[in-house]
Image: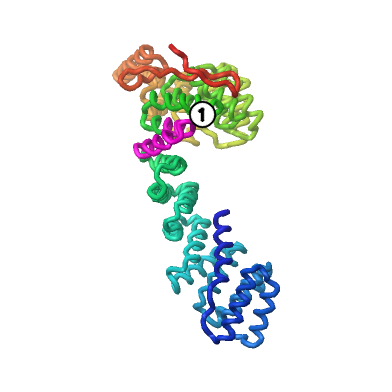
């Protein structure tokens, strides 16, 4: 919007300098003199001169238009609009009046009307520079970037600074195709400019054109090797290409250049967690949280990393701190309840899960966890109600099918358990427990062949878990191991080091 205001102000000022259409030599001279007074900022004298012209020539459209400009600049918006209207009633195709009226309408937040005026200007004069510029700015302000981009690009011409500014605006609006085109044009006019290449790389990354993005960001990094941002972005690209080693090397370099860089510490945590190095990820999430001064997403991911590392008590601590800062976030209360449940702290879990439901009454996961806890406590009627409620809210959620099926097996309601457990297998066939519960149900129902099949599948999956562990490590490409990671320093000002081993 700042760019839009600048363009509109510029348009109004420039329109004054346009020569009026020929009427008579005397009127032309008087109008020219009045226009010069406007340009000199002598608005009171200009108004008096223009009104004098209108006393003898009341049907002079150019004079009404000029008076509109003067009144507009003096803050008399309503009177200015009347003068523009008078000019256009006399000469409907007077583009200066149409353009200036469009500016006035835009300034008074009547965007739709302003757009219509500038479109009308371009119908009469397709090359009207100010109308092209202002219409493009108004389209952009309205979120219509498809129509805005070609107009703004045409208005910018071969001005690299303007092209760059417009490209930034398009990128901010997530119109990355247009932004890339303008950044590339800017790069042709001003090659090897860090800011251009860096922003081009980001726009290409957002279009998933990763190889081109990598090339642009690498060029930017070569121009300013002391800047940490390109390494951060190059790490994102490597991560998107599933090259964990390269990603971690880029991010380590970024931290060497800028030790206080929470986004980088966060992304190292994300990459390690993605590769199931949960325990290693925790320290980087902790550092990101410290450096970012408690951002919500960092609390969430640190807590999840502790859950994945089976450090449930620590996860409870993280989420307890988080809910004190963000008491109205239902997801935090649910995760606190989930962590407490995993730690066996059922009273704390129930309190947190109930609070999650107060904030988000249709939270199927909260109902499922409460149902599990009730089942563990032998509160079977309540457990069944809670688990059925969870299934009704989310028919594709696996846990309540498994837990309700297991509860019904326990209660010897085998016929009811079978379809629930079968549906559970459809949702998560790799879980050994659901196959075991279905084996029990089939056994009690004397369905031997089906029971044997489920028992065999349970043993196969259980052996696989025992061989690889519950959270197997994902190997790196070509059998490589993790590169040396930066040591997370205790203080924000400490510079990370790379261990020699």
Q: Which residue is mark 1?
A: 387
Q: Give 91 or 130, whichever is nearer the viewer.
A: 130
Q: Main secondary structure of the magenta part?
A: helix
Q: Residue furthest left?
A: 449
Residue drawn at x 35%, y 13% is: 463
Which percent across, then down, holds residue 384?
A: 52, 27
Residue drawn at x 51%, y 32% is: 390
* Res. 146 visible in picture: no
Residue 362 falls inside the magenta stretch: no
Residue drawn at x 68%, y 68% is: 74
Which percent across, then down, holds residue 346?
A: 59, 19
What colour scheme governs how the chains and residues are painted in the rendered image of this protein? rainbow
Q: Give 41 or 469, whichever is nearer the viewer.
A: 41
Q: For residue 271, what is the image quadrant?
A: top left
Residue 233 falls inside the magenta stretch: yes
Query: What segment is highlighted magenta in the picture?
Result: 210-236
Secondary structure beneath disc 1?
Answer: helix
The quadrant of the rendering that contains the C terminus is top left
Which percent across, then down, holds residue 219?
A: 39, 37
Residue 212 left/right relative to 111 = left
Q: Give 443 or 37, whichever is nearer the viewer.
A: 37
Residue drawn at x 53%, y 28% is: 258
């Amino acid at each position: 919007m700042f760019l839009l205001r600048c363009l509109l102000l510029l348009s109004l000022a420039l329109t004054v300098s346009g020569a009026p259409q020929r009427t008579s030599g005397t009127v032309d001279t008087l109008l020219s003199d009045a226009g010069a007074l406007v340009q000199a900022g002598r608005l009171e004298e200009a108004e008096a001169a223009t009104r004098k012209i209108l006393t003898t020539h009341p049907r002079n459209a150019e004079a009404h238009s000029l008076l509109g400009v003067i009144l507009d600049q003096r803050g008399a918006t309503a009177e200015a609009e009347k003068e523009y209207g008078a000019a256009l009633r006399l000469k409907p195709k007077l583009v200066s009046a149409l353009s200036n009226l469009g500016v006035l309408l835009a300034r008074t937040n009547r965007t739709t009307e302003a757009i219509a005026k500038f479109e009308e200007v371009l119908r009469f004069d397709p090359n009207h520079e100010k109308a092209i510029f202002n219409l493009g700015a108004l389209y952009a302000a309205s979120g219509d970037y498809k129509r805005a981009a070609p107009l703004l690009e045409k208005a910018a011409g071969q001005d690299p600074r303007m092209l760059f500014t417009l490209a930034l605006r398009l990128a901010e609006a997530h119109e990355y195709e247009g932004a890339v085109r303008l950044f590339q044009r800017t790069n042709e006019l001003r090659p090897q400019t860090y800011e251009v290449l860096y922003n081009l790389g980001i726009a290409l990354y957002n279009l998933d054109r990763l190889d081109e993005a990598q090339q642009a960001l690498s060029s930017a990094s070569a121009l300013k090797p002391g800047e940490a941002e390109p390494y951060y972005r190059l790490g994102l690209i490597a991560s998107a290409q599933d090259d964990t080693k390269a990603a971690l090397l880029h991010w380590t370099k970024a931290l060497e250049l800028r030790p206080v860089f929470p986004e980088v510490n966060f992304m190292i945590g994300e990459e390690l967690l993605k590769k199931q190095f949960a325990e290693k990820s925790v320290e980087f999430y902790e550092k990101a949280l410290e450096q970012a001064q408690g951002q919500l997403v960092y609390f969430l991911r640190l807590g999840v990393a502790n859950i994945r590392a089976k450090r449930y008590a620590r996860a409870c601590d993280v989420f307890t701190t988080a809910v004190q800062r963000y008491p109205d976030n239902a997801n935090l209360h649910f995760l606190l309840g989930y962590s407490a449940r995993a730690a066996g702290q059922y009273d704390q879990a129930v309190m947190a899960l109930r609070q999650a439901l107060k904030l988000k009454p249709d939270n199927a996961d909260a109902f499922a966890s409460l149902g599990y806890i009730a089942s563990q406590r032998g509160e079977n009627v309540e457990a069944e109600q809670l688990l059925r409620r969870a299934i009704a809210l989310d028919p594709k959620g696996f846990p309540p099918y498994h837990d309700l099926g297991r509860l019904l097996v326990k209660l010897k309601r085998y016929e009811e358990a079978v379809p629930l457990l079968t549906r559970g297998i459809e949702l998560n066939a790799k879980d050994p427990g659901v196959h075991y519960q279905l084996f029990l149900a089939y056994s009690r129902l004397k369905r031997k062949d089906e029971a044997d099949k489920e028992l065999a599948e349970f043993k196969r999956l259980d052996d696989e878990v025992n061989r690889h562990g519950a959270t197997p490590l994902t190997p790196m490409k070509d059998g490589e191991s993790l590169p040396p990671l930066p040591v997370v320093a205790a203080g924000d000002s400490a510079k990370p080091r790379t261990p020699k081993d």
